[in-house]
Amino acid sequence: MKRGDVFWANLSPRSGSEQTGRRPVIILSHDAFNQTPTWRSIIVIPLSTSTTQARRGPTVVAVKAGIAGLSDDCSALCHQITTLDRAKLTDKIGELPLDVLSQVERALFAAVGVERR
């Protein structure tokens, strides 16, 4: 498992407006953590097929069907970054190309108010 990989994950239970259920997520945590079997926490960004979510602005990145093995157009919801136990990750779907991963990183910076220098 490495940064930029896309996996199916079980995001239940969640609450409020958090993404829930079985859905694809992008692995965002550093590979030093991802590749350490005893490190249980994985930082992810959920993907959604919701057209409402797709219009949320600079914290959302469009990921077209076919990219990273995804069967539908999705949106990476960088404003909903979360940490999961790696047991919630099931099957690997694919991996993002570097240009899309860079877009996700820029959207994440926008979500947390960090300026890239």
Image: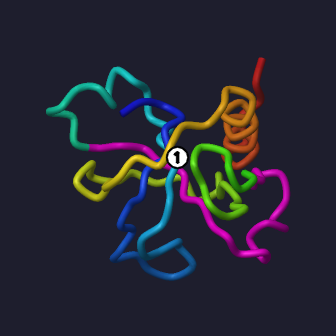
Residue labelled with disc 1: 26
The image position of residue 51, as x and y in percent, is: 78, 75
Q: Nearer the viewer, residue 15 or 75?
A: 75
Q: Residues within 10 Å of mark 1 (few under 14, many from 20)?
A: many
Q: Nearer the viewer, residue 86 or 97?
A: 97
In the shown orientation, is residue 110 left or right of residue 82? right
Q: Quadrant of the C terminus?
A: top right
Instruction: Check the image and name the residue furthest to the top.
Output: 117
The image position of residue 101, as x and y in percent, is: 66, 34
Q: Nearer the viewer, residue 113 or 37?
A: 37
The image position of residue 49, as x and y in percent, is: 67, 70
Q: Quadrant of residue 53?
A: bottom right
From this view, report whether residue 35 is shown above or below residue 95: above
Over which residues does the magenta segment extend? 41-62
Tell me, yes or no, whether the highlighted magenta stretch contains residue 84.
Answer: no
The image position of residue 97, as x and y in percent, is: 66, 31
